[in-house]
Amino acid sequence: MIAAVLWTLAGSVLLVALDGRADAQVRVFWLFQPPLDLLLAYSSWQVGRRATGSVRRFWLVMAVAGALLTVGDTVQVAIALASRDQWSTSGGAVQAVCFTAGLAALIIAMLLYPIPGRTRRERLAFWLDSATVLVGGAVVAWCFAAGPDDVLGQLVTGAVILTSGFAAVKLVLSGNAPMHKAAALPLVASAGVNAVGFFLAPGAEGPMPAHVYAVRLLPSLLIAVGPRVQELLARFDETAAFGSRRRKPYSLLPYGSIAVAFTAVLTTIPEGPHARLWGAVTGLGLIFALVVCRQLAAFRDNTRLIDQLDATLADLREHETRLRHQALSDGLTGLANRTSFHEQLTAALAAPAAADTTSVLLIDLDGFKAVNDTLGHAAGDALLAGVADRLRASVRTEDLVARLGGDEFAVLLRDCDVDGASQTADRVLHELASPIPYEDTVVRANASIGIACAGPGDDGGSLLRSADLAMYAAKRDGKGTWKCYEEPASTVTSTA
Protein backbone atom coordinates (compact mmCIF):
# COMPACT_ATOMS: atom_id res chain seq x y z
CA MET A 1 0.00 0.00 0.00
CA ILE A 2 2.89 2.34 0.76
CA ALA A 3 4.36 1.48 -2.64
CA ALA A 4 1.05 2.38 -4.30
CA VAL A 5 1.00 5.75 -2.55
CA LEU A 6 4.61 6.47 -3.57
CA TRP A 7 3.86 5.32 -7.10
CA THR A 8 0.92 7.72 -7.39
CA LEU A 9 2.95 10.54 -5.86
CA ALA A 10 5.69 9.97 -8.39
CA GLY A 11 3.17 10.08 -11.22
CA SER A 12 1.68 13.33 -9.89
CA VAL A 13 5.14 14.91 -9.70
CA LEU A 14 5.83 13.90 -13.30
CA LEU A 15 2.50 15.34 -14.43
CA VAL A 16 3.32 18.66 -12.78
CA ALA A 17 6.87 18.63 -14.16
CA LEU A 18 5.53 18.09 -17.68
CA ASP A 19 3.11 21.01 -17.44
CA GLY A 20 2.46 22.41 -20.90
CA ARG A 21 3.39 19.16 -22.66
CA ALA A 22 -0.06 17.56 -22.85
CA ASP A 23 1.07 14.71 -25.08
CA ALA A 24 3.66 13.54 -22.51
CA GLN A 25 1.24 14.10 -19.65
CA VAL A 26 -1.32 11.78 -21.20
CA ARG A 27 1.32 9.06 -21.66
CA VAL A 28 2.36 9.38 -17.98
CA PHE A 29 -1.29 9.37 -16.90
CA TRP A 30 -1.94 6.03 -18.59
CA LEU A 31 1.42 4.46 -17.75
CA PHE A 32 0.72 4.82 -14.02
CA GLN A 33 -2.74 3.20 -14.19
CA PRO A 34 -2.12 -0.60 -14.76
CA PRO A 35 -0.06 -1.23 -11.55
CA LEU A 36 -2.85 0.32 -9.46
CA ASP A 37 -5.41 -1.76 -11.33
CA LEU A 38 -3.38 -4.90 -10.61
CA LEU A 39 -3.30 -4.04 -6.90
CA LEU A 40 -7.09 -3.66 -6.97
CA ALA A 41 -7.58 -7.04 -8.67
CA TYR A 42 -5.06 -8.89 -6.48
CA SER A 43 -6.30 -7.49 -3.15
CA SER A 44 -9.94 -8.15 -4.07
CA TRP A 45 -9.12 -11.73 -5.03
CA GLN A 46 -7.29 -12.26 -1.73
CA VAL A 47 -10.27 -10.94 0.23
CA GLY A 48 -12.63 -13.17 -1.78
CA ARG A 49 -10.56 -16.22 -0.87
CA ARG A 50 -11.07 -15.52 2.84
CA ALA A 51 -14.78 -14.67 2.64
CA THR A 52 -17.85 -16.86 2.15
CA GLY A 53 -21.34 -16.58 0.66
CA SER A 54 -22.52 -13.26 -0.73
CA VAL A 55 -19.44 -11.49 0.65
CA ARG A 56 -17.21 -13.80 -1.37
CA ARG A 57 -19.24 -13.18 -4.53
CA PHE A 58 -18.98 -9.42 -4.05
CA TRP A 59 -15.20 -9.46 -3.76
CA LEU A 60 -14.81 -11.80 -6.71
CA VAL A 61 -16.84 -9.32 -8.78
CA MET A 62 -14.48 -6.62 -7.53
CA ALA A 63 -11.50 -8.75 -8.63
CA VAL A 64 -13.06 -9.20 -12.09
CA ALA A 65 -13.59 -5.43 -12.31
CA GLY A 66 -9.93 -4.89 -11.41
CA ALA A 67 -8.86 -7.36 -14.07
CA LEU A 68 -11.01 -5.61 -16.70
CA LEU A 69 -9.53 -2.24 -15.75
CA THR A 70 -6.03 -3.72 -16.02
CA VAL A 71 -6.71 -5.02 -19.51
CA GLY A 72 -8.37 -1.81 -20.71
CA ASP A 73 -5.74 0.50 -19.24
CA THR A 74 -2.86 -1.65 -20.58
CA VAL A 75 -4.32 -1.44 -24.08
CA GLN A 76 -4.71 2.31 -23.62
CA VAL A 77 -1.03 2.61 -22.61
CA ALA A 78 -0.03 1.16 -25.97
CA ILE A 79 -2.40 3.54 -27.76
CA ALA A 80 -1.12 6.55 -25.80
CA LEU A 81 2.53 5.69 -26.53
CA ALA A 82 1.77 5.42 -30.25
CA SER A 83 -0.37 8.55 -30.52
CA ARG A 84 0.64 12.16 -31.05
CA ASP A 85 -0.89 15.53 -30.17
CA GLN A 86 -3.13 14.05 -27.50
CA TRP A 87 -4.42 15.92 -24.41
CA SER A 88 -7.62 14.18 -23.24
CA THR A 89 -7.70 11.51 -20.51
CA SER A 90 -10.60 9.80 -22.23
CA GLY A 91 -9.78 6.23 -23.21
CA GLY A 92 -10.26 4.48 -26.51
CA ALA A 93 -12.93 1.96 -27.42
CA VAL A 94 -11.29 -1.02 -25.66
CA GLN A 95 -10.59 0.93 -22.47
CA ALA A 96 -14.10 2.40 -22.46
CA VAL A 97 -15.72 -1.04 -22.86
CA CYS A 98 -13.57 -2.60 -20.11
CA PHE A 99 -14.13 0.36 -17.77
CA THR A 100 -17.88 0.42 -18.37
CA ALA A 101 -18.24 -3.34 -17.92
CA GLY A 102 -16.16 -3.38 -14.73
CA LEU A 103 -17.86 -0.35 -13.18
CA ALA A 104 -21.33 -1.60 -14.11
CA ALA A 105 -20.65 -5.00 -12.56
CA LEU A 106 -19.35 -3.34 -9.40
CA ILE A 107 -22.27 -0.93 -9.03
CA ILE A 108 -24.80 -3.71 -9.64
CA ALA A 109 -23.03 -5.90 -7.08
CA MET A 110 -23.21 -3.09 -4.51
CA LEU A 111 -26.84 -2.19 -5.20
CA LEU A 112 -28.04 -5.81 -5.20
CA TYR A 113 -25.96 -6.96 -2.23
CA PRO A 114 -28.44 -8.70 0.11
CA ILE A 115 -29.34 -6.83 3.29
CA PRO A 116 -31.05 -9.08 5.88
CA GLY A 117 -34.38 -8.17 7.41
CA ARG A 118 -35.49 -5.86 4.62
CA THR A 119 -39.22 -5.40 4.26
CA ARG A 120 -41.02 -4.30 1.11
CA ARG A 121 -41.24 -0.74 2.46
CA GLU A 122 -37.53 -0.69 3.23
CA ARG A 123 -36.74 -1.79 -0.32
CA LEU A 124 -39.04 0.94 -1.66
CA ALA A 125 -37.28 3.53 0.51
CA PHE A 126 -33.90 2.28 -0.73
CA TRP A 127 -34.80 2.69 -4.38
CA LEU A 128 -36.42 6.09 -3.78
CA ASP A 129 -33.17 7.23 -2.17
CA SER A 130 -31.24 5.84 -5.14
CA ALA A 131 -33.45 7.64 -7.65
CA THR A 132 -33.12 10.89 -5.70
CA VAL A 133 -29.33 10.76 -5.82
CA LEU A 134 -29.35 9.81 -9.49
CA VAL A 135 -31.52 12.79 -10.38
CA GLY A 136 -29.25 15.04 -8.31
CA GLY A 137 -26.25 13.82 -10.28
CA ALA A 138 -28.07 14.41 -13.55
CA VAL A 139 -28.96 17.99 -12.52
CA VAL A 140 -25.34 18.80 -11.69
CA ALA A 141 -24.11 17.24 -14.92
CA TRP A 142 -26.74 19.13 -16.93
CA CYS A 143 -25.86 22.49 -15.39
CA PHE A 144 -22.08 22.34 -15.17
CA ALA A 145 -20.67 19.46 -17.18
CA ALA A 146 -22.80 18.97 -20.22
CA GLY A 147 -21.15 20.30 -23.34
CA PRO A 148 -23.07 21.11 -26.47
CA ASP A 149 -21.59 18.17 -28.35
CA ASP A 150 -21.87 15.39 -25.78
CA VAL A 151 -24.84 16.11 -23.51
CA LEU A 152 -25.93 12.49 -23.08
CA GLY A 153 -22.42 11.22 -22.39
CA GLN A 154 -21.78 13.90 -19.78
CA LEU A 155 -25.13 13.20 -18.07
CA VAL A 156 -24.44 9.49 -17.91
CA THR A 157 -20.96 10.09 -16.53
CA GLY A 158 -22.24 12.35 -13.75
CA ALA A 159 -25.01 9.92 -12.83
CA VAL A 160 -22.58 7.00 -12.73
CA ILE A 161 -20.19 8.90 -10.47
CA LEU A 162 -22.87 9.67 -7.88
CA THR A 163 -24.48 6.25 -8.18
CA SER A 164 -21.21 4.49 -7.39
CA GLY A 165 -20.67 6.75 -4.40
CA PHE A 166 -24.26 6.23 -3.26
CA ALA A 167 -23.98 2.45 -3.55
CA ALA A 168 -20.80 2.42 -1.48
CA VAL A 169 -22.31 4.61 1.24
CA LYS A 170 -25.46 2.47 1.40
CA LEU A 171 -23.31 -0.60 1.96
CA VAL A 172 -21.64 1.11 4.90
CA LEU A 173 -24.96 2.23 6.40
CA SER A 174 -26.68 -1.12 5.85
CA GLY A 175 -25.08 -2.81 8.86
CA ASN A 176 -24.26 -5.85 6.71
CA ALA A 177 -21.68 -4.42 4.33
CA PRO A 178 -19.19 -6.83 2.71
CA MET A 179 -16.38 -4.52 3.80
CA HIS A 180 -15.19 -2.69 6.87
CA LYS A 181 -15.83 1.05 7.10
CA ALA A 182 -12.09 1.68 6.90
CA ALA A 183 -12.05 -0.06 3.50
CA ALA A 184 -15.21 1.63 2.25
CA LEU A 185 -14.08 5.17 2.99
CA PRO A 186 -11.36 5.22 0.28
CA LEU A 187 -13.91 3.93 -2.24
CA VAL A 188 -16.37 6.65 -1.28
CA ALA A 189 -13.59 9.23 -1.43
CA SER A 190 -12.62 8.04 -4.90
CA ALA A 191 -16.10 8.90 -6.17
CA GLY A 192 -15.79 12.41 -4.73
CA VAL A 193 -12.30 12.96 -6.13
CA ASN A 194 -13.41 11.58 -9.48
CA ALA A 195 -16.24 14.10 -9.52
CA VAL A 196 -13.83 16.92 -8.67
CA GLY A 197 -11.48 15.90 -11.47
CA PHE A 198 -14.43 15.67 -13.84
CA PHE A 199 -15.74 19.14 -13.02
CA LEU A 200 -12.33 20.88 -12.94
CA ALA A 201 -12.27 20.96 -16.72
CA PRO A 202 -15.79 20.27 -18.03
CA GLY A 203 -16.08 20.23 -21.77
CA ALA A 204 -12.36 20.98 -22.24
CA GLU A 205 -11.30 21.14 -25.87
CA GLY A 206 -7.55 21.35 -25.44
CA PRO A 207 -4.62 20.80 -23.04
CA MET A 208 -5.56 21.01 -19.37
CA PRO A 209 -3.60 22.29 -16.35
CA ALA A 210 -1.23 19.82 -14.70
CA HIS A 211 -3.27 19.65 -11.49
CA VAL A 212 -6.28 18.36 -13.44
CA TYR A 213 -4.29 15.37 -14.70
CA ALA A 214 -2.97 14.74 -11.15
CA VAL A 215 -6.44 14.89 -9.61
CA ARG A 216 -7.78 12.49 -12.22
CA LEU A 217 -4.99 10.02 -11.38
CA LEU A 218 -5.78 9.97 -7.64
CA PRO A 219 -9.09 7.95 -7.81
CA SER A 220 -7.20 4.92 -9.14
CA LEU A 221 -5.08 4.93 -5.97
CA LEU A 222 -8.10 5.27 -3.67
CA ILE A 223 -9.97 2.47 -5.44
CA ALA A 224 -6.95 0.18 -5.03
CA VAL A 225 -6.34 1.13 -1.39
CA GLY A 226 -9.85 0.13 -0.24
CA PRO A 227 -9.51 -3.60 -1.06
CA ARG A 228 -5.94 -3.60 0.27
CA VAL A 229 -7.19 -2.29 3.64
CA GLN A 230 -9.90 -4.95 3.64
CA GLU A 231 -7.31 -7.63 2.89
CA LEU A 232 -5.16 -6.56 5.84
CA LEU A 233 -8.15 -6.48 8.18
CA ALA A 234 -9.34 -9.91 7.02
CA ARG A 235 -5.86 -11.35 7.45
CA PHE A 236 -5.63 -10.37 11.13
CA ASP A 237 -9.27 -10.23 12.33
CA GLU A 238 -11.98 -11.75 10.14
CA THR A 239 -14.71 -11.03 12.71
CA ALA A 240 -14.07 -7.29 12.60
CA ALA A 241 -13.58 -7.31 8.84
CA PHE A 242 -16.83 -9.03 7.89
CA GLY A 243 -18.95 -8.65 11.05
CA SER A 244 -22.37 -7.01 10.93
CA ARG A 245 -22.74 -3.53 12.36
CA ARG A 246 -25.68 -1.44 13.51
CA ARG A 247 -27.78 -0.38 10.56
CA LYS A 248 -28.73 3.28 10.31
CA PRO A 249 -32.52 3.75 10.04
CA TYR A 250 -32.15 6.72 7.69
CA SER A 251 -29.97 8.27 4.99
CA LEU A 252 -29.09 11.94 4.57
CA LEU A 253 -28.03 11.54 0.94
CA PRO A 254 -31.45 12.51 -0.55
CA TYR A 255 -31.36 15.78 1.38
CA GLY A 256 -27.84 16.35 0.12
CA SER A 257 -29.20 15.91 -3.41
CA ILE A 258 -31.81 18.60 -2.71
CA ALA A 259 -29.09 20.99 -1.55
CA VAL A 260 -26.91 20.27 -4.57
CA ALA A 261 -29.78 20.67 -7.06
CA PHE A 262 -31.00 23.86 -5.36
CA THR A 263 -27.49 25.29 -5.55
CA ALA A 264 -27.36 24.41 -9.24
CA VAL A 265 -30.64 26.26 -9.83
CA LEU A 266 -29.44 29.36 -7.97
CA THR A 267 -26.20 29.32 -9.96
CA THR A 268 -27.94 29.18 -13.34
CA ILE A 269 -30.67 31.74 -12.58
CA PRO A 270 -28.48 34.80 -13.37
CA GLU A 271 -28.02 33.51 -16.92
CA GLY A 272 -31.73 33.97 -17.56
CA PRO A 273 -34.25 31.49 -18.96
CA HIS A 274 -32.51 28.80 -20.98
CA ALA A 275 -32.34 25.03 -21.31
CA ARG A 276 -29.94 24.57 -18.38
CA LEU A 277 -32.18 26.48 -15.99
CA TRP A 278 -35.37 24.67 -17.03
CA GLY A 279 -33.61 21.32 -16.80
CA ALA A 280 -32.33 22.15 -13.31
CA VAL A 281 -35.77 23.30 -12.14
CA THR A 282 -37.37 20.15 -13.54
CA GLY A 283 -34.80 17.97 -11.81
CA LEU A 284 -35.27 19.82 -8.52
CA GLY A 285 -39.04 19.33 -8.73
CA LEU A 286 -38.56 15.63 -9.41
CA ILE A 287 -36.22 15.36 -6.42
CA PHE A 288 -38.82 17.02 -4.19
CA ALA A 289 -41.45 14.58 -5.42
CA LEU A 290 -39.21 11.60 -4.69
CA VAL A 291 -38.39 12.91 -1.22
CA VAL A 292 -42.11 13.44 -0.50
CA CYS A 293 -42.80 9.85 -1.51
CA ARG A 294 -39.95 8.77 0.74
CA GLN A 295 -41.43 10.71 3.65
CA LEU A 296 -44.89 9.26 3.05
CA ALA A 297 -43.39 5.78 3.23
CA ALA A 298 -41.59 6.78 6.42
CA PHE A 299 -44.83 8.15 7.90
CA ARG A 300 -46.56 4.86 7.18
CA ASP A 301 -43.72 3.02 8.89
CA ASN A 302 -43.86 5.39 11.85
CA THR A 303 -47.63 4.89 12.18
CA ARG A 304 -47.16 1.14 12.09
CA LEU A 305 -44.40 1.35 14.69
CA ILE A 306 -46.57 3.55 16.94
CA ASP A 307 -49.44 1.05 16.65
CA GLN A 308 -47.06 -1.76 17.53
CA LEU A 309 -45.73 0.27 20.45
CA ASP A 310 -49.26 0.94 21.72
CA ALA A 311 -50.10 -2.75 21.48
CA THR A 312 -46.87 -3.66 23.25
CA LEU A 313 -47.54 -1.15 26.04
CA ALA A 314 -51.08 -2.48 26.44
CA ASP A 315 -49.71 -6.02 26.70
CA LEU A 316 -47.15 -4.85 29.24
CA ARG A 317 -49.82 -3.12 31.32
CA GLU A 318 -52.01 -6.20 31.18
CA HIS A 319 -49.04 -8.36 32.10
CA GLU A 320 -48.19 -6.02 34.98
CA THR A 321 -51.77 -6.16 36.25
CA ARG A 322 -51.76 -9.94 35.98
CA LEU A 323 -48.45 -10.22 37.82
CA ARG A 324 -49.61 -7.86 40.55
CA HIS A 325 -52.82 -9.84 40.93
CA GLN A 326 -50.81 -13.06 41.17
CA ALA A 327 -48.46 -11.48 43.70
CA LEU A 328 -51.31 -10.23 45.91
CA SER A 329 -53.88 -13.03 45.59
CA ASP A 330 -54.20 -16.67 46.55
CA GLY A 331 -54.03 -18.99 43.57
CA LEU A 332 -56.56 -21.53 44.86
CA THR A 333 -59.34 -19.34 46.23
CA GLY A 334 -58.77 -16.04 44.43
CA LEU A 335 -58.80 -14.24 47.78
CA ALA A 336 -56.20 -11.71 48.84
CA ASN A 337 -53.02 -13.33 50.20
CA ARG A 338 -51.13 -12.54 53.37
CA THR A 339 -49.06 -9.78 51.73
CA SER A 340 -52.09 -7.98 50.35
CA PHE A 341 -53.97 -8.33 53.64
CA HIS A 342 -51.13 -6.79 55.63
CA GLU A 343 -50.80 -3.90 53.15
CA GLN A 344 -54.48 -3.04 53.31
CA LEU A 345 -54.68 -3.49 57.08
CA THR A 346 -51.75 -1.12 57.54
CA ALA A 347 -53.38 1.41 55.21
CA ALA A 348 -56.68 1.18 57.12
CA LEU A 349 -55.00 1.75 60.48
CA ALA A 350 -53.01 4.70 59.05
CA ALA A 351 -56.22 6.62 58.26
CA PRO A 352 -56.96 8.79 61.34
CA ALA A 353 -60.73 8.68 60.90
CA ALA A 354 -60.85 4.89 60.50
CA ALA A 355 -58.19 3.70 62.94
CA ASP A 356 -60.64 3.20 65.85
CA THR A 357 -63.32 1.52 63.70
CA THR A 358 -61.19 -1.16 62.10
CA SER A 359 -61.75 -4.79 63.10
CA VAL A 360 -60.19 -8.09 62.14
CA LEU A 361 -61.64 -11.60 62.07
CA LEU A 362 -59.12 -14.45 62.17
CA ILE A 363 -60.73 -17.72 61.04
CA ASP A 364 -59.23 -21.19 61.44
CA LEU A 365 -61.04 -24.26 60.11
CA ASP A 366 -61.70 -27.18 62.43
CA GLY A 367 -61.53 -30.62 60.86
CA PHE A 368 -59.73 -29.60 57.66
CA LYS A 369 -56.92 -32.11 58.23
CA ALA A 370 -59.45 -34.92 58.57
CA VAL A 371 -60.97 -34.05 55.19
CA ASN A 372 -57.52 -34.07 53.59
CA ASP A 373 -56.58 -37.39 55.18
CA THR A 374 -59.80 -39.25 54.39
CA LEU A 375 -60.91 -37.84 51.03
CA GLY A 376 -57.61 -36.52 49.62
CA HIS A 377 -56.16 -33.15 48.77
CA ALA A 378 -58.68 -32.50 45.99
CA ALA A 379 -61.45 -32.62 48.56
CA GLY A 380 -59.46 -30.32 50.81
CA ASP A 381 -59.03 -27.85 47.95
CA ALA A 382 -62.76 -27.98 47.24
CA LEU A 383 -63.44 -27.27 50.91
CA LEU A 384 -61.10 -24.26 50.93
CA ALA A 385 -62.66 -22.86 47.73
CA GLY A 386 -66.16 -23.37 49.19
CA VAL A 387 -65.19 -21.64 52.44
CA ALA A 388 -63.81 -18.69 50.41
CA ASP A 389 -67.17 -18.36 48.63
CA ARG A 390 -69.06 -18.49 51.96
CA LEU A 391 -66.82 -15.82 53.45
CA ARG A 392 -67.33 -13.52 50.49
CA ALA A 393 -71.09 -13.93 50.92
CA SER A 394 -70.85 -13.03 54.60
CA VAL A 395 -69.15 -9.63 54.33
CA ARG A 396 -69.78 -6.24 52.75
CA THR A 397 -68.26 -5.09 49.49
CA GLU A 398 -65.87 -2.72 51.28
CA ASP A 399 -64.51 -5.51 53.48
CA LEU A 400 -61.51 -7.66 52.54
CA VAL A 401 -61.37 -11.46 52.77
CA ALA A 402 -57.93 -13.10 52.64
CA ARG A 403 -56.42 -16.55 52.92
CA LEU A 404 -53.33 -16.26 55.10
CA GLY A 405 -52.16 -19.79 54.42
CA GLY A 406 -53.27 -23.40 54.88
CA ASP A 407 -56.76 -23.38 56.43
CA GLU A 408 -56.39 -19.93 58.01
CA PHE A 409 -58.46 -17.02 56.74
CA ALA A 410 -58.83 -13.39 57.78
CA VAL A 411 -61.39 -10.65 57.24
CA LEU A 412 -60.62 -6.92 57.37
CA LEU A 413 -63.75 -5.00 58.44
CA ARG A 414 -63.56 -1.30 57.71
CA ASP A 415 -65.72 1.17 59.64
CA CYS A 416 -66.93 -1.61 61.90
CA ASP A 417 -67.02 -1.69 65.72
CA VAL A 418 -67.15 -4.72 67.99
CA ASP A 419 -70.90 -5.16 67.55
CA GLY A 420 -70.65 -5.15 63.76
CA ALA A 421 -67.71 -7.56 63.90
CA SER A 422 -69.70 -9.90 66.14
CA GLN A 423 -72.60 -9.86 63.72
CA THR A 424 -70.24 -10.65 60.85
CA ALA A 425 -68.78 -13.58 62.79
CA ASP A 426 -72.28 -14.93 63.35
CA ARG A 427 -73.01 -14.71 59.63
CA VAL A 428 -69.77 -16.55 58.83
CA LEU A 429 -70.60 -19.38 61.24
CA HIS A 430 -74.09 -19.60 59.79
CA GLU A 431 -72.76 -19.81 56.22
CA LEU A 432 -70.18 -22.45 57.15
CA ALA A 433 -72.82 -24.59 58.83
CA SER A 434 -74.06 -25.68 55.38
CA PRO A 435 -72.13 -28.58 53.78
CA ILE A 436 -70.07 -27.96 50.63
CA PRO A 437 -70.72 -30.32 47.67
CA TYR A 438 -67.77 -32.38 46.43
CA GLU A 439 -68.26 -34.93 43.65
CA ASP A 440 -70.94 -37.36 44.89
CA THR A 441 -70.62 -36.39 48.55
CA VAL A 442 -70.30 -33.28 50.70
CA VAL A 443 -67.56 -31.87 52.90
CA ARG A 444 -67.87 -29.56 55.83
CA ALA A 445 -65.66 -27.87 58.37
CA ASN A 446 -66.43 -25.87 61.45
CA ALA A 447 -64.46 -22.75 62.24
CA SER A 448 -62.94 -20.99 65.23
CA ILE A 449 -63.02 -17.21 64.91
CA GLY A 450 -61.04 -14.61 66.79
CA ILE A 451 -62.12 -10.99 66.76
CA ALA A 452 -59.95 -7.98 67.49
CA CYS A 453 -60.99 -4.34 67.26
CA ALA A 454 -58.32 -1.64 66.81
CA GLY A 455 -57.55 0.72 69.60
CA PRO A 456 -55.30 3.76 69.97
CA GLY A 457 -51.71 2.97 68.94
CA ASP A 458 -52.50 -0.44 67.44
CA ASP A 459 -50.63 -1.52 64.35
CA GLY A 460 -51.29 -4.40 61.99
CA GLY A 461 -49.05 -6.84 63.82
CA SER A 462 -50.51 -6.20 67.26
CA LEU A 463 -54.10 -6.35 65.95
CA LEU A 464 -53.46 -9.73 64.31
CA ARG A 465 -51.81 -11.07 67.48
CA SER A 466 -54.88 -10.05 69.46
CA ALA A 467 -57.17 -11.79 66.97
CA ASP A 468 -54.91 -14.84 67.06
CA LEU A 469 -55.20 -15.06 70.85
CA ALA A 470 -58.98 -14.81 70.61
CA MET A 471 -59.06 -17.46 67.86
CA TYR A 472 -57.11 -19.97 69.94
CA ALA A 473 -59.37 -19.34 72.89
CA ALA A 474 -62.34 -20.16 70.70
CA LYS A 475 -60.58 -23.27 69.39
CA ARG A 476 -60.03 -24.49 72.96
CA ASP A 477 -63.81 -24.43 73.50
CA GLY A 478 -64.13 -26.74 70.53
CA LYS A 479 -67.64 -25.58 69.55
CA GLY A 480 -66.97 -23.66 66.47
CA THR A 481 -67.67 -20.36 68.20
CA TRP A 482 -66.02 -16.98 68.10
CA LYS A 483 -64.15 -15.04 70.74
CA CYS A 484 -63.40 -11.35 71.02
CA TYR A 485 -60.16 -9.96 72.39
CA GLU A 486 -60.97 -7.22 74.89
CA GLU A 487 -58.07 -4.78 75.18
CA PRO A 488 -59.01 -2.95 78.42
CA ALA A 489 -59.09 -6.14 80.52
CA SER A 490 -56.09 -7.55 78.64
CA THR A 491 -57.88 -10.89 78.54
CA VAL A 492 -59.72 -13.04 76.06
CA THR A 493 -63.39 -13.43 76.87
CA SER A 494 -66.19 -15.30 75.20
CA THR A 495 -69.06 -13.30 73.89
CA ALA A 496 -70.93 -16.10 72.20
Image (spheres, rainbow, N blue to C red):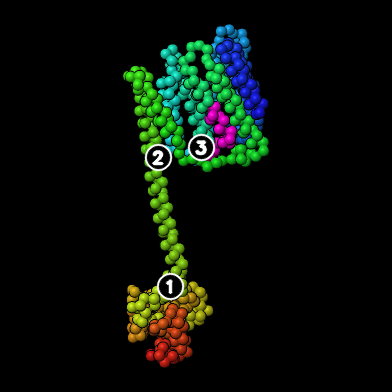
Q: CA distance from mark 1 to mark 3?
A: 54 Å
**Point 46% across, 41% down: residue:** 249
Residue located beneath label 2 in the image: 298
Question: In the drawing, what numbered circle is on residue 314?
Answer: none
* Camera-side residue of 294 and 203: 203
Picture disc at residue 173: 3
Q: Secondary structure at mark 2?
A: helix
Specify the quadrant of the image occupied by residue 264: top left
Frontmost residue, 12 versus 177: 12
The answer to which of marks 2 and 3 sits earlier in the sequence is 3
Residue at horizontal 44%, vertical 59%? 319
Is 157 displayed left or right of 224 in the figure?
left
> What segment is highlighted magenta in the picture?
173-191
Q: Quadrant of the C terminus?
A: bottom left
Determine crowd level at label 2: few under 14, some 14-19, many 20+ residues with C-alpha closer than 10 A: some
How far is mark 1 from mark 2, CA to CA?
Answer: 49 Å
Q: Quadrant of the N terminus?
A: top right
- Going by the numbered disc 1, the residue's amino acid type is Glu
Residue 105 image-quadrant placement: top right
Would residue 232 be seen by someone viewing this image from the given angle? yes
Report the front residue among 477 and 327: 327
* Three-letter residue code for mark 3: Leu
Q: Where 149 falls versus 381 (above or below)?
A: above
Residue 341 visible at all: no
